[in-house]
Amino acid sequence: MAGSTHTVTNQAPPLTGYDVFTADRALTEAVERHLPTELREEALAELSGTGRSCGALQTQEWGAQANASPPVLRTHDRYGHRIDEVDFHPAWHRLLGKGVSAGLTDAWSRPGGHVRRAAGFLMWTQVEAGNCCPLSMTHAAVPALRADPDLAAEWVPRLTSRVYDRELRPARLKAGVLFGMGMTEKQGGSDVRANTTSARPLAEAGTYALTGHKWFCSAPMSDGFLVLARAPGGLTCFLVPRVLADGTRNVFLIQRLKDKLGNRSNASAEVEFAGTWARRVGEEGRGMATVIEMVAATRLDCVLGSAGLMRQAVAQAVHHCGYREAFGGKLADKPLMRNVLADLAIESEAATVLGMRLAAAHDAAGAGDERERALLRLAVPAAKYWVTKRCAPVAVEAAECLGGNGYVEESGLPRLVRESPLNSIWEGAGNVQALDVLRALGREPAALDAYLTEVGAARGADHRLDAAIRDLLTELADLAAAEGRARLLAERLALVLQGALLVRYAPPEVADAFCASRLGGDGGAAFGTLPPTLDLAAVVERARPVV
């Protein structure tokens, strides 16, 4: 029995039992904006169902359980046979099943599929980000496999299936499959052209035996993997099935699992190939060209994943401060805390609006819009560079809004903090993205034209945005020796694009605050330094999750 001094007061109730989708105004507005009228009713209903699942107490508990019980590698069975299997907590499988059934691997086969999937992925990240890794790679494998029509016909229907089948067996016997990838090696890291894994042609056309290693291979219990290796004709993309057609296990030697800062529920492995059977995807020597759209898709998922983490951090902070009282009133009503919350909310909304705009561009590009395809070429690496870097400071500041409570595991904020740097590192760290921005600027004039057309649609609506566009044009006029300032260029490209989108689509108070602080220089380096003349109360209220 609790003692009389242990009456619990002045604590916020758990943020649970709510619709994560309808509670996120920026996200719902983006879906409505980017989907044709005839798709909206069905999509909104479907996403609301996913949102309720994300906000359910049971789903949140599965996320906590999966994170608290990292996967375990079993290299051999009790008799000494090599099996190379990874055991996961049951909660991991429940989450993957929910994610697959929600369509998070199915963007390519239906109208508006990328917008619908992006909204679901952004929400699902808020439950447990680790299981989003195999969902992302499975989704991204589709355009790579389409380089080989026969492979696509065999695998794509299973990749886009709404059925999760965890058993290791031949893909032809499964209603749904998941994919992983193995690109990086010890000596090369992000420089995948330095890969040394070799591919020896076999008698059957298009088949090879791989020998080598992969330093990072995520989701090693997947049904198939896209791998880069050196064939006689150069660096080539291959499909490595986990189980061969006759039911025998492919040679897939898991050496160890990585002990990571965050992303604890997801297995990232070091893998050895020793005569591993593989099927070529695309032409020999065209490995990078084959996987380029896959890379773009996973990079966009990094943007969406970071946007999701930021949204959950901001939702928790606003929710807490809306209940917590201090110094004679609600924390959220205190001018300084309101400034912090509004600043965080602006960062979160800017990330969401940008991520969803890029998802819409994927849908348009898939329908043949070359301007949208060109926009993606420049905007995706710039967005990946900037949005993923903003995630960690947002998560840390949001935890601080909860005070000591935010430093305690039960609050969920420490998990967000540990997860927050990941998307900036994976799929090409900051320098890789910044250099990719430079390549797009130097080699693909259509990409810059598409970008300038996009931001130009907002010119004249805000003088700070107009000035930022002019300054950016001055920066872009001279790209000689630009490598040393590539990060600054990527940052400014992302900020101007975010500002243009908010000016066009967000409420005036949100756009005003963003342009003042991010483009106009009217704010400090830390969160909570917005000009007090702005309508910060409206910004915070917009970010409040309604339970």
Image (spheres, helix red, strand yellow):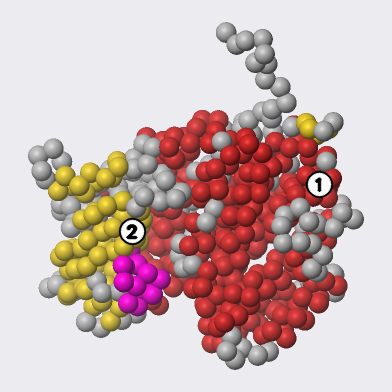
What residue occupies the far top of the structure in this picture?
1
Q: Is residue 145 in sight in this rendering? A: yes
- Residue nearest the observer in this picture, 241 or 481: 481
What residue occupies the far right of the structure in this picture?
533
Who's the residue at 31% across and 68% down the image?
A: 185
Locate residue 514 relative to residue 313 in the image: left or right: right
Of tags 2 and 1, which is closer to the observer? 1
Q: Amino acid at mark 1?
A: Leu
- Residue 474, position in %: x, y? 72, 86
Who's the residue at 31% across and 67% down the image?
A: 186
Residue 476 sits inside the magenta stretch: no
Label of residue 217 in the image? 2
Report the quarter where the N terminus lies. Answer: top right
Who's the residue at 31% across and 71% down the image?
A: 187
Provide the secondary structure element on which disc 2 rests: strand
Q: Main secondary structure of the magenta part?
A: loop
Locate residue 465 relative to residue 498 in the image: left or right: right
Locate residue 289 relative to residue 527 in the image: left or right: left
- Residue 357, position in %: x, y? 64, 63
- Residue 237, position in %: x, y? 31, 72
Provide the secondary structure element on which disc 1 rests: helix
Report the quarter where the C terminus lies. Answer: top right
- Which residue is label 1 attached to? 336
Q: Amino acid at mark 2?
A: Cys
Report the span colored magenta.
182-194
Label of residue 375 in the image? none
Among the two numbered marks 2 and 1 on one chain, the one whose residue lies closer to the N terminus: 2
Above or below: residue 46 compared with residue 111: above
Q: Is residue 45 in sight in this rendering? A: no
Hey, which quadrant is residue 265 in on the image?
A: top left
For label 1, the crowd category at 10 Å Cα-Cα, with few meaning under 14, some 14 to 19 and many 20 or more, is: some
